[in-house]
Image: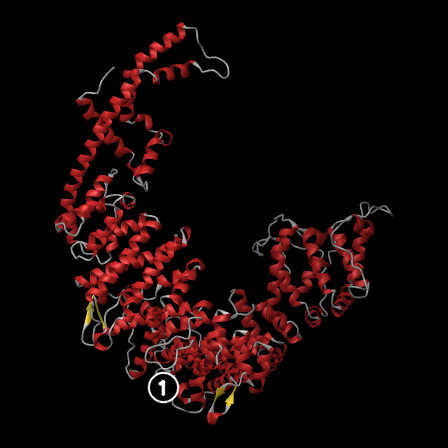
Amino acid sequence: MSQLSAGDEVQLQSLLKQLLRSISDKISGAPSTECAEEILLHLEETDKNFHNYEFVRYLRQHVESSLGPVVEDELQNLTRGGQHAVGPGQDTSVQVVTRRTRASAQYHQMLQTLKATMMVAVESLITKFDEDQLRKEEMHREIERCQSNSQFTDNCSDSDSSFNQSYAFIRQEQLQVLAEQLDSNKPKEVRREALQALCCAPPSDVLSCESWSTLRRNLCSALTEPDLSENVLQFFAKSFSSSPLNVTREIYTSLAKSLESAFLSQRLNFPTRSAAVDINSPQISRLLKQIRLMNDFQKEVTTFWIRHPEKYMEEIIESTFCLLSFHHDHGSTGTEKTLEPVHLLSLLDIKATWFNKWMHGYYSRTVVLRLLERKYKTLIVSALQQCLHFSESSERSSSEAADPHVEDSSDPGLLQRGVFTRRDLEYSFFVHSLCILGKLIIYTNGRKLFPIKIRKHKDPVTLTDLIVVLINIMYRHPRPSNGDSSPTGSLSPSCLVMEVLWMLCERTECAADCLHQTPVIETLIAPVVALLNAQQTNLKNPAATLILIADVLARIANTDRGLALFLYEKNLVVAHSEKTFAAHIVVQFTLRLLNKALPSLSGSDASQTLCGAFIFVCRQMYNTCEGLQVLQTYGLHKAIAAAWKKTSSLSERIPTPVSGSCTGPSTQETANILVWEETMLGSLLNFAATPRGLLLLQQTGAINECVSYMFSRFTKKLQVSRCEKFGYGVMVTQIAATAPGVAALHNSGFVRLLVVDLWSALECGGDDARVIRPKPTPMDSIDRSCLKSFLSLVNLLSSSLSVWELLSRQPLANKSEYSLREIPSSIPDLIDRLVAVDSDVKIHSLFQYEQSHTFGLRLLSVLCCCLDSFLLLESQYNICCSLLQSQRENVADQDATDGAIIIDSLSVERNHILVRVHVVGGPSERRLPSRALDEVSFLHLA
């Protein structure tokens, strides 16, 4: 048997290295060594090029040269003995030869020789790899030190580690040595080299080794040293991205404890008015990088911690809360205030995205609220205290022109400067605190944390007190001018407060607990009351602030509880201690704005926007019956109609633009006039939401214009308003209940649109009505596609007044010829084509005759439910005679006097309508035939 020589060992090493390089893509993505071994064991099954690798060919040749004579001998012995492939239950010749060969001494000797040689080759490869890797690290060390990147996680990529183009393994013995080299008693250079080697190793191997506890302790110790912390963070970042939660939680908690110790030992001073924090300083930069790594993990961990035991998640949450609340009880006051972890965290994640994600899912939210209630309420106390502090400082500095909000982190000047003043830090902490409190109070258990006792405050701060404080902050810092939508503008106090108030308005229980309270309503209405009483307000920008107030009031009035609060609770104090209702204050103020009776606001550029905002508040009240009853006495509809007529006359005098002419500044003025006119029309249109309101709308004489405006928005698929309670379908039903309303709908083109849509859905299967093509469609599918158009048409014709207005003295066409492209454009045309189908011409003009005619009969059945409508149809179109004649003609042989009746969906529907219109009585006085055919109904119909 051949033995492997020294030359064979060298060749084997080269072939093995070549194999590893060829399959590096397959094994480099393996999360652990065990997975890599599985990939190698099943390589023949998964790699089609397996037998083409030189290493595999070499092994095959070696096996053949070693075991070839043995196989030949066994085959001869088997043949000489007369044994061949046999029946079931016995081995074949191949199996016998294989078993005997594997039991031979030559086979075992070949395995031992091959195994020993392979071990030598692998050990040699690992040794060479270690030497090459150390040389590479030495070569790149200087380059890595020169690289400066504020986002250190980019330096934590493992794209330059391991083999780079091959695969690395690390033994337990090596990890034990690295753990010893990382000991704090070792020289710094030794520890640095050990860290660099650790960063190049697969994190899964490191975190699962027996020396991990020692390694973790030494890594945390190295994290406090400036020269070593960067390498430790690189390893932690790699571990976070490639390790399970049961391991990464240990790294996270260790990082949190290390940060806690660093802040406690260094005791960094909070900047005074003349000082600032330089984030580029080594000390602050090192802390920021650690907090940044924690914050990135906080935002990503929510995607997978539900797959692990709750104790892991609780450990992460508790270590975070411990870090953020530890110093609150130990920090000093005044100018000696210390810089805390939450200040740096608020710079990195100013809107507390991490907390929002933790509170989003019930799984984590339960743990968060439990820990806040039992152990870490100081975190909420600190956030609340910061909001109160910001409110008080804003009140003291209300005369300052600029808002003390932090600059946008994407501003190039800020990145170059890298310096944050005391006011910047306090504002970022305020924003962070406000976002935490805003997310907290939208949940029931979060609101149960209130009232909260605050230092230097005599009484505990209640939930209502917090909302009042936030509203006062909004008053002192109105929305940024010119519609600023930049990230900086979104961080303004008014935008942040409005986001919180919007979230509360959207939730019934939150609104009831937080907003539907007398002190909150009083605070919102106070500036309005002051202006009505000709008193001075302390608002920095009255128009902008009042627009925000109107927005909140409209959202409150949009709910049943809020509307009742406005209409029926006499809780607002006006002049001379007199109390009144919020609804009266709002409508009086709106009338003053419409009549321009408030000089302090009339000259403002935003006066029309402000007026529209308060009209919108009134809309939430007068589009309900109870609200209209309260507001009707003020004649708001007349004031709005007068404002519309005045604006309409101005818009009619606008000259038509001429090409080449100078438009100048009048373009914006023209646009403002058109927007204001649409605002007035939309406000008048909303009176049609109730029957009494529709009457008031008719009295203004603007119903035709309002319906035309509604039709234009309906065709563009625009919603009624941002506080939409219903679509335009409700208004169409209300308007169609009166003759003037139906006439306005008809004149606006609304009726034609419904007819065309229904015809398009029936005959074209929903295709463009202008291009009609045959498209066979099952009846059920047609019903679904036509349902919306059918219901809209039924709503339109639900009143006998509507039917009379649209059909009175309107004859049917009954043409001698109908084009296939001819589309009905009115209700009489629709009846002519779908209901009164009494000729072959009409039948042949329908692509889907049976389905379309059935649909028309269903519409007729609905119209006949109203006696007045039926009498009009019968007197004009002889509906009953037409139906009876169609039934007579629906026989198999029309020449025979007693031909067999054809029973189909059309005859069943006609039979149903005939019984309905000829038999008088209610549900218990008559039995209408079913539209579903069964044996009983079949015999009854026959």
**Image check: 34 left or right of 594?**
left
Query: Is residue 443 something that shows in the picture?
Result: no
Image location of residue 908, percent across then percent down: 76, 53
Query: Is residue 768 something that shows in the picture?
Result: yes
Image location of residue 784, percent across then percent down: 62, 55
Q: Nearer the viewer, residue 618 or 362?
A: 362
Residue at point 78% right, 67% down?
Answer: 875
On screen, residue 737 above or below 846: below
Q: Residues within 10 Å of mark 1 (few under 14, many from 20)?
A: few
Image location of residue 780, percent across then percent down: 64, 51
Secondary structure of the residue carrying numbered label 1: loop
Image mark count:
1
Badge 1 amino acid: Asn
**Image check: 11 left or right of 399?**
left
Examine the image and state in which quarter residue 291 appears.
bottom left
**Image check: 323 left or right of 277?**
right
Residue at point 38% right, 14% down?
Answer: 97
What residue would you read off at disc 1? 538
On screen, residue 556 above or below 537: above
Q: Quadrant of the N terminus?
A: top left
On screen, residue 467 above or below 79: below
On screen, residue 96 above or below 600: above
